[in-house]
């Protein structure tokens, strides 16, 4: 099945999904953050079919989230190392992890997020790096970016009017 490409979309969320927009890719990235780097390690952890894993690793490498490195000459064996772009996915994954932890029964939680140094449980939230303020739907809106055209500006105005309760 051919995936739809979002690479030409103006929305940063859609463009991000073009890089990591399926569950296998996100789980591969999760495993990479847990120290896995080799095909057989990913396959054992995920139980994914080799052809699917091959496609996902190729896609993540082409999108710049992994770098493929030869670690054994004969036969040729490669490992997949996170790039800076791949490491930048960490907060996204932790936000997804936190959201999942809030919405599944506590007795089903096999993992919790913890502070690496103290071992204490972490309570996460998204904050504005400049102000330290929590980012919520109530205090956040879209702004027009440098590539915004009239259609984008109109959409933002409609969303803002809806949020403020102004009938259009």
Image (cartoon, rainbow, N blue to C red):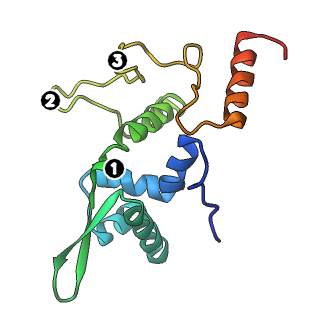
Look at the numbered discs 2 and 3 and tell me whether their residues touch, using CB distance below 8 Å: no
Residue 117 - label: 2
Q: Quadrant of residue 82?
A: bottom left
Q: Is residue 8 above or below residue 123?
A: below
Contact between marks 2 and 1 (CB within 8 A): the answer is: no
The residue where tag 3 is placed is: 130
Query: Residue shown at 24%/79% (left/top)?
Result: 77
Residue receiving disc 1: 85
For the image, the number of numbered tags is 3
Q: Secondary structure at mark 3?
A: loop
| Mark 1–mark 3 distance (CA, rounded to whole Å) | 21 Å
Q: Which secondary structure lies at badge 1? A: helix
Query: Is the residue 3 above or below the residue 133 in the image?
Result: below
Percent coordinates x, y for residue 7 in the rendering: 56, 56
Q: Compared with residue 70, is residue 99 higher up or lower down, i.e. above or below?
A: above
In space, the residues marked 2 and 3 are separated at their CA atoms by 25 Å
The C terminus sits in image quarter: top right
Give the residue drawn at x 37%, y 50%.
30
Horizontal and vertical percent position of residue 65: 36, 56
């Amino acid at each position: 099945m051919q995936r739809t490409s979002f690479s030409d979309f103006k929305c940063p969320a859609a463009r991000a999904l073009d890089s990591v927009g399926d569950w296998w890719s996100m789980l591969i990235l999760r495993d990479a953050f847990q120290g896995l780097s080799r095909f057989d390690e990913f396959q054992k952890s995920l139980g994914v079919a080799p052809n699917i894993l091959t496609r996902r690793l190729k896609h993540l490498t082409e999108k710049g989230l992994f770098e493929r490195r030869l670690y054994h000459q004969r036969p040729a064996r490669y490992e997949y190392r996170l790039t800076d772009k791949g490491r930048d996915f960490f907060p996204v994954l932790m936000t997804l992890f936190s959201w999942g932890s809030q919405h599944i029964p506590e007795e089903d939680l096999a993992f919790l997020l913890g502070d690496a140094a103290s071992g204490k449980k972490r309570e996460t939230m998204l904050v504005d790096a400049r102000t330290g303020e929590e980012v919520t739907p109530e205090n956040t809106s879209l702004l027009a970016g440098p590539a915004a055209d009239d259609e984008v500006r109109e959409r933002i105005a409609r969303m803002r009017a809806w949020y403020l309760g102004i009938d259009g």
